[in-house]
Amino acid sequence: NGNDNNNMNDDNNMDKEESVDGDNSKDNKSSKDKKSNKSEIAIIYCNRSAAYVYLQEYQRAVDDAKFALKNDPLLTKAWIRKGMAEQELKRYQTAYGDYQVALNQSKQSDNYYKFLIKKIKQCFDQILLQHTQSQQHNNDDQNNNDIGSLNSPHSQQYNENNQSMQP
């Protein structure tokens, strides 16, 4: 009789497990549907982002690409679209990062791989140019400050004093 009770408990536990499994499969299906919907939404926004790039409405392209990535961060084309728009807006460091993410998600056999390499180089060159120009501007400012100090009232007084001391 003790064994019969154990068997009955086992049967009850099996029923509970089956009902839990049944619920889980519904949750899994619902979860898959949500992922599928998010992926479809991401693709739609990515495609609209491409249209905005074509129309040269770059900020709208960035906004749609960001929304696409919010729904599917692994959507490589959204990273590319965002990078293209950011590059056109002269936000080269951001574009560089976007292209790097896309490249990291790509294989050399992908048809856009060489395109990404080219875009990364373009952004890098622009970042380098901006940095060089910034350094040059800082040096020009420093030189102007040095020249300005030679023309300051204190330097004129110093020069006058030194001239009067010479034989």
Image (cartoon, rainbow, N blue to C red):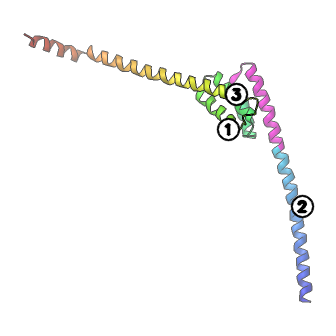
Quadrant assignment, res 21: bottom right
Between residue 74 and residue 21, name the one nearer to us: 74
Q: CA distance from mark 3 to mark 1?
A: 13 Å
Residue at image mark 1: 104
The vertical placement of 16 against 142, above or below, is: below
Quadrant assignment, res 166: top left
Observer able to see residue 91: no
Mark 3: amino acid: Lys
Q: Nearer the viewer, mark 2 or mark 3?
A: 3
Between residue 37 and residue 73, name the one nearer to us: 73
The vertical placement of 81 against 105, above or below, is: above
Mark 2: amino acid: Gly
Mark 1: amino acid: Asn
Is the stretch drawn in magenta largely helix, strand or loop?
A: helix
Is label 1 in a helix, a strand or a loop?
A: helix
Do the residues under discs 2 and 3 have CB atoms within 8 angstroms?
Answer: no
Residue at image mark 3: 114
Is label 3 in a helix, a strand or a loop?
A: helix
Q: Nearer the viewer, mark 2 or mark 1?
A: 1
Query: Does residue 101 appear to the left or right of 41 in the view shown?
Result: left
Which residue is located at x 23 percent, y 15 percent? 153
Give the residue at the far bottom of this rendering: 1
x then y, percent, for residue 1: 92, 89
Q: Residues within 10 Å of mark 3 (few under 14, many from 20)?
A: few
Query: Does residue 87 appear to the left or right of 160 in the view shown?
Result: right
Residue at image mark 2: 22
Give the residue at the far left of this rendering: 167
x then y, percent, for residue 80: 71, 30
Observer able to see residue 111: yes
Q: Which residues are magenta?
A: 36-60
Badge 2 or badge 1: first in the primary sequence = 2
Does the magenta run of residues contain 37? yes
